[in-house]
Amino acid sequence: MTTDRSPGWRKGAALGSGLLALGMGLTALLAGAASPTGPWVKLQPLPIPARQHTTVWQVVGNPAAPQDLAMATSQGVWVSSDDGQTWNPTSITQFTWALAYGNGGTVLYAGTLRSGVYRSTDGGQGWKKADTGLRNLDVRAISTGPTAIVLGTQAGVYVSGDGLAWERAGLQNLSISAVSIIANTPLGVIAGSDQLAQRNNLYRSLAVGVSSGWQALPGGDPGGAPVFSVAAGPVLKGGTVPPILVGSLKGLYASPDGGNTWQAQTLAGGALWSVDAIAFDPNNPAVVYVGGDNGGSTGGGLQRSVNGGGTWAAFEVGLPSQEVSGLSALSTTPLTVLAGVWNPLTRQGAAARALDTTAPPPVALSSSSGTPISVAVSPTPTPSPTPPRHHPRSARRAPFPIGVAVAAIILLVLSGTALAVYLRRRRRRLDAEAPP
């Protein structure tokens, strides 16, 4: 049997090969055009075994040195001095909820699950506990300003003028999941709780440290939905109040007047995920980013508005996952946005950075200054890492009949199980056990 090797066959084979190569090139080109890399770049993963399922709650950058980053995770605080190319562990190795820079970047605060608040003056290399006056060691949220540092804890709000000693500032019966300073003198604060079955979970005080009065803001939290994030933007020059955004299980709400009135925000594509993270451009209140999740299953996303919430558009191309757990923005050129995300399929957290080259330029802002508030700390007992739950203790009574007691125990177990399942999905901790 012979094979035809004539010149005509060779020309045909060459032509076929050329067409095949051309087709493959066009396919690759079209695939590249259909899948742009986008603004997001995944930062170097932490050197932690995958089996530990590390959650990344927050990534922040030093406003005075943007290449210096810090990350709050379920495995402690990690820092980077090279813009996230490498990460180094710190002395804080326990579950950490929140991080915040203060005093222009010279001080860094960390809020932990069971060990209270820590303070660093060297960019996170060294840490010291700062728990004087703190009665609860579950520090879930931190907000810093020129006159005060505010903590949200498992048992209310605490305030400090120097970050060393703390004073109770109200809402002790609520687990505060988000706080944001909205005024400096007197100190104004918005606080949100993520507790279930509450009539109100969003509150405002316009004189923290002077008056303990908190006002419920049902317009920003209709139906008492669990609140997961609160943020106040910078104040325009000539203005007096910042724009405020609140993210909850029921979506996103905005206030242009310091919390007096609220409007529901319609995200692009009719997105209905719960809003877990919010970040304003430090130099332009019209530019804001929001991220959320779908209760631990696939879903969620990240969107941006460049007109103060008038319209929203997806801003997630290149993001390692659409489940967004934390957001922050740095004053750089172009604007830097940092995100913490969770992948429910791999059960891994990650961090990413975006350089937003299409964000509007900075605008003239009002100056922020003031004298740090004075804190009068009274002697307090040793802080408790496991505070009482948010249910009043029953007075001592006569013993219940056995049947009633058994039924009550079963009901409590079922209720606790349902709540645990909800929190497990909601927080994406999966393997990490922590209070809500």
Image (cartoon, rainbow, N blue to C red):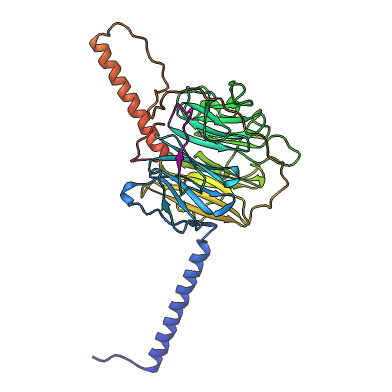
Counting the numbered discs, the total is 0
Q: Residue at x 42, y 37 (%)?
A: 426
Residue 293, placed above or below residue 81: above
399, 29: nearer the viewer: 399
Q: Does the magenta stretch mainly form a helix, a strand or a loop?
A: loop
Q: Give the quadrant of residue 3.
A: bottom left
In this view, the residue farthest toward the bottom is 7
Question: Which quadrant: the N terminus?
Answer: bottom left
Q: Residue at x 62, y 33 (%)?
A: 372
Residue 272, visible in the rendered structure: no
In this view, the residue farthest toward the top is 398
Instruction: Describe residue 172's horizontal placement relative to residue 233 as left or right.
Output: left
Q: Give the quadrant of residue 298.
A: top left
Residue 97 at what x, y percent from top left? 45, 39
Residue 40 at what x, y percent from top left? 52, 56
Residue 86 at what x, y percent from top left? 44, 58
Q: Is residue 292 magenta?
A: no
Q: Residue at x 45, y 73 (%)?
A: 24
Instruction: Describe residue 137's horizontal placement relative to residue 312 as left or right.
Output: left
Residue 173, placed above or below residue 334: above
Residue 163, placed above or below residue 315: above
221, 94: nearer the viewer: 94
Q: Give the quadrant of residue 211.
A: top right
Question: Which quadrant: the C terminus?
Answer: top left
Q: Which residues are magenta?
A: 127-136
400, 71: nearer the viewer: 71
